[in-house]
Image (cartoon, rainbow, N blue to C red):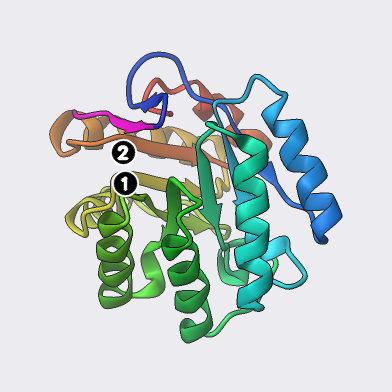
């Protein structure tokens, strides 16, 4: 399995990496949180842009990205616009989602971007291609807040992320029982053993899923 190197952070090797989100709604909150992340022992920061009140204003987003980048200095920055259907704060039409992410990729300020798998193969492929041209790495993700699918479906989704050429594959699911947590662990182990050639991140959410955070496949 190949690792992914982002600035001074190697994902896919060694101990789990720590990512701290920036979730401010206003410019002041965002910059204050960015400064706190920079001073923390985190490995990289994630700007959850769906929390930002002006996220659909291209000028504001560009300015915030530049300011965050300056504050973080050499700390890697992940850009995430999480849609409402996958646990985010914003409803967004496909075109809006694509435009926000395109602007982030072209900003020259980010190192990594999260792209939701179920945006559609064509859209995901477009964003991945644009990101790679800009030397931005891509997490292809899926968040299921309703259930934990069967093991075969979990593996299928992870394989699809890899086929679309995401640099990191991420899957988060909701357990309805402790058995579901073990289903995810089994799927992750099989994915890493038989299919994965790049880092895989999986997690089982809520209190029942805490044990899943001990998996060595996390980055």
Q: Is residue 151 left or right of residue 215?
A: left
Mark before the other along the chain sequence, 1 or 2:
1
Quadrant of the drawing holding the N terminus: top left
- Secondary structure under the numbered disc 1 in the rendered image: helix
Q: Nearer the viewer, residue 171 or 125?
A: 125
The residue that appears at 48% across and 78% down in the rendered structure is 99
Question: Circle 1: is it few (<14), some (14-19), or many (20+) Cα within 10 Å?
Answer: some
Which residue matches tag 1? 151
Whether residue 147 is situated above or below residue 90 in the rendered picture: above
> What kind of element bears circle 2?
helix
Query: Which of the 4 image quadrants contains residue 37?
Result: top right
Q: Position of residue 81 (x, y in %)?
A: 57, 63
Residue 88 in view: no
Do tag 1 and tag 2 residues touch (Cβ < 8 Å)? Answer: yes
Residue that mark 2 sits on: 187
For the residue pair 17 and 156, the one nearer the viewer reads as 17
As drawn, which residue projects farthest toward the left?
Answer: 194
* Residue extent of the magenta highlight: 1-6
Q: CA distance from mark 1 to mark 2?
A: 5 Å
Q: Is residue 4 magenta?
A: yes
């Amino acid at each position: 399995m190949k690792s992914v190197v982002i600035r001074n952070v190697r994902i896919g090797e060694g101990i789990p990496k720590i990512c701290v989100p920036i979730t401010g709604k206003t410019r002041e909150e965002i910059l204050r949180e960015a400064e706190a992340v920079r001073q923390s022992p985190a490995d990289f920061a994630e700007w959850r842009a769906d929390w930002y009140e002006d996220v659909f204003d291209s000028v504001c987003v560009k300015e915030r990205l530049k300011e965050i980048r300056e504050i973080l200095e050499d700390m890697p920055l992940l850009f995430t616009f999480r849609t409402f259907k996958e646990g985010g704060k914003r409803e967004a039409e496909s075109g809006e989602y694509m435009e926000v992410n395109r602007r982030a990729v072209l900003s020259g300020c980010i190192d990594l971007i999260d792209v939701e798998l179920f945006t559609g193969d064509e859209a995901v492929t477009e964003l991945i291609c644009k990101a790679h041209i800009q030397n931005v790495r891509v997490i292809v993700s899926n968040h299921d807040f309703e259930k934990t699918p069967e093991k075969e479906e979990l593996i299928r989704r992870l394989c699809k992320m890899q086929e679309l050429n995401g640099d990191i594959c991420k899957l988060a699911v909701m357990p309805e029982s402790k058995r579901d947590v073990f289903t995810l662990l089994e799927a992750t182990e099989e994915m890493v053993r038989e299919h994965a050639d790049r880092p895989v991140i999986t997690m089982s959410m809520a209190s029942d899923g805490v044990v899943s955070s001990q998996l060595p496949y996390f980055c």
